[in-house]
Image: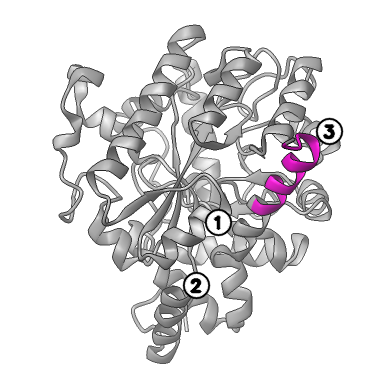
Amino acid sequence: MTIGSERADGRAAARANALLRRVQLADGHNDLPWALRELAGERGWAADWASSDLTVRRTDLHTDLVRLREGALTLQFWSVYVPCRLEGHSAVTATLEQIEVVYELVNRYPEHLQLARTVDEAEAAFAAGRIASLLGAEGGHSINNSLGALRALHRLGVRYMTLTHNNNTDWADSATDEPVHNGLNDFGREVVREMNRLGMLVDLSHVAPATMRDALAVSEAPVIFSHSSCRAVADHPRNVPDDVLADMAAKGGVCMVTFVPRFVSQPLAEWDDRLRDAMAAAGADHRDLAERNAFEAGWTGGGDKPQVTVDDVVRHLEHAREVAGIDHIGLGGDYDGVPRQPEGLEDVSCYPRLFTALLERGWSEQECTKLAGANTLRVLREAEQVSRKLHPIV
């Protein structure tokens, strides 16, 4: 049968739902905190964005507590993303505000969410029937070239940092900017070493392949891709080349395959190339997400936008399993970070559909357990172990 069709085998669906009630399901990247900020509009941070009720099914978000429970998600890295247009101290301030959003969510919904800073705390949250809530900083601009700021983010609970977002930092090249450093410069390598010491995972989503390779060469702890897919399947710069997937696996890392339509569909990646060229001709910046979404809304020059389905995501998962191995893949949906997700994966309630499709294709329950969360928990624990070795408590 076709993956993602409505004729899903009832036995596979039942097995998928039972599996996801039994094991901790982890997702590497969700942009709800920034989506809530955007809902406040011009009122900005001063607004009572928290009046947004997440205990009801929403139509303006991919994420709410009703659908999180339906999707059986029990470990979420909440992205404390800030856009690259915020620079210097403004980026640091906005990142702190985004961290506060997550703390407020946890405080407001304690029966559903539980802050976790360690693997033990994440597993305890699962045992208590709550969603383990971890923090991930998206973009090295959030530390403003300061190791002190990096340490402060760690104290506040941030457990991974994406080295860049869509623009280069002063110390690392992004996948979607013109190369300046040929990967990492000396300070960038020091950032990676400090992240190892702290026990903060090095996240290589968004970075250029040269940056990926430099970070892999420097890092003593396994690295992650919090929301990236496979470049061999869809040739988009946000995806991971096969040689990097193999090197990441050899060093114990995890690639959390994303659902972002532009990254998982080759026809849509080509359509996105045309959009980028049109924006460049109009003097607009494709790297700026708000600017891109606004331009795309009025753009008619690209032809029909290709449709993307759960089938496309499965192709990336199977390719990553082949190249990196089953012990080195996870999930990073990027819900509320893009306007629309693939058909069959429209919101956070849809994880069981994905696992149903995988079981129908012959994936074992052991393989699905590793993909669901065991690999993510393992890499977190290994980062903690490296930190203890590099920074023993005396």
User: What distance separates the C-alpha of mark 3 from that of mark 2?
Assistant: 33 Å
Say left or right for 220 vs 379.
right
Under mark 2, the amino acid is Val
* Amino acid on which disc 3 is placed: Val
Q: Residue at x 43, y 67 (%)?
A: 127
Q: Position of residue 187 (x, y in %)?
A: 76, 16
* Residue 390 on the magenta span: yes
Magenta stretch in the rendered image: 381-393
Residues at marks 1 and 2, CA–CA distance in whole angstroms: 15 Å
Point out the frontmost of discs 3 and 2. Answer: 2
Crowding near pointer 3: few (<14 within 10 Å), some, many (20+)?
some
Name the kind of residue labelled 1 in the image.
Asp
Q: CA distance from mark 3 to mark 1?
A: 27 Å
Q: Which residue is mark 3?
A: 218
Relative image position of residue 182 (x, y in whole percent) = 80, 21
Question: Looking at the picture, does residue 120 appear above or below residue 298?
Answer: below
Q: Is residue 97 left or right of residue 154?
A: left
Give the number of callouts.
3
